Amino acid sequence: MMDDEQFPAIMKQLSTIKDRSPFYKKKYESIDLTKIKNIEDFRKLPLTDKCELREAYPLGLQSVPDEEVVRIHSSSGTTGLPVIIPYTKQDVEDWAIMFARCYEFAGVTKKDRIHITPGYGLWTAGIGFQAGAERLGAMAIPMGPGNTDKQLKMMEDMGSTVLTATSSYALLLAEEIEKRGIKDRIKLKKALIGSERWGDKMRNRIADELGVELYDIYGLTEIYGPGIGISCEHATGMHYWTDYVYFEIIDPKTGKNLPDGEYGELVITTLRKQGAPLIRYRTHDLTRIIPGECACGSKFPRIDILIGRTDDMVKVKGVNIFPGQIEDLLKDIEGVSSEYQVMIDHLEGKDSLTLFFETKLEGKDRKELEKEVKEQFKSRIGITIISKAVSMGELPRSEKKSHRIFDNRY
């Protein structure tokens, strides 16, 4: 899906990209960009992958002189060298504008008090939530992650009305509020949740236990950070800002473009970014562009809630398995809570998958539930597993992102 203003914006980026970006000068060395005349030509440009960005460490992506860079952010670098993204003054302002728009889509106003729990520093999350709140004119409460006792005290004392968090930490806070019996002293009305995919069971638990309206917010460090898209009150996908980013969906195996409505890998091109513009960047996030208009009446199109990542997939006993499949299975089984953990081992020459899940059931009922989960997994996903029910709260909680699949075979 492309609006009338996007292709001219793409062409404007391409007209100077080789002059500005050493990275793209090298990448497009053998390509005559002046021959791109339409969107079909543009989609023939090679995709950009994260491994290439890592190879540009530390500042190989920088596309402006040093004196124009006002900030850097970075990916975590947990699977190799981090990706360093330089930002200009305009980049920072553009990001704040998009983020303020996200708050507005969620019905947040200047009267709200926004409790910010994502991390600060090189990570893009905390400072993005704060800049958007300040741009909107709302009160920002920049807590950062951790220290749950202090989080809850400030939340209560300051009368926080909006929570921003990962789904994992939002659940942890919800459980602590319930455990301490302070729900009547908490004034939260909305929660903006991002950074990781989360299933319907977790979504429903957080909404019910906190008593809030939930909004999915989308973004990634390489493309500003969180704030380039958000769900609206109708919760039918996430609107994204076509005046700043161009979205494509491709088949992750072939790289070919897919029509609206089909699931594939999201590819993003920045339309205004100065410090480190990216062209046809593979996010590895799996989603689809939702056809048609949203009931909210917004002109901004939507992508669906993420169903996973191409690099989340594990192969066990010859079967490809995504976390989203496990979440979809568990949400349909009564008695299973939102939290689960998968352990994959190679024992006595065979792969073994153990699925741990939380439940309130005990005794015989718990054994019957384990049997049902095992049977459903075999029927719907295709392999026999070890099904293990545990008590509520027994699986670890995280102040950041939850790690749910542990592959111990390698």
Image (cartoon, rainbow, N blue to C red):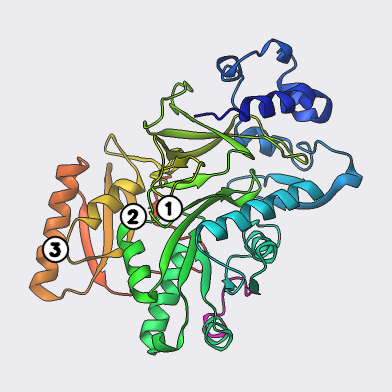
What amino acid does circle 2 point to? Met
Q: CA distance from mark 1 to mark 2?
A: 19 Å
User: What residue do we see at 12% from left, 57% from top?
Assistant: 372
User: What residue do we see at 79% from left, 30% from top?
Assistant: 21
**Residue 157 percent coordinates (x, y):** 56, 89
Mark nearer the N terminus (2 vs 3)? 2
How many residues crowd mark 1 within 10 Å: few (<14), some (14–19), many (20+)?
A: many
User: What residue do we see at 39% from left, 75% from top?
Assistant: 210
Which of 202 and 122 lies nearest the eye of the viewer? 202
Q: Which residue is mark 3?
A: 369
What amino acid does circle 3 point to? Leu
Q: Which residue is mark 2?
A: 343
* Extreme residue in the right direction: 67
Mark nearer the N terminus (1 vs 2)? 1
Q: Which residue is mark 1?
A: 197
Asked if the magenta segment contains residue 148, the reply would be yes
Relative side of 180 to 114, left or right: left
**The magenta segment:** 141-150
Mark nearer the N terminus (1 vs 3)? 1
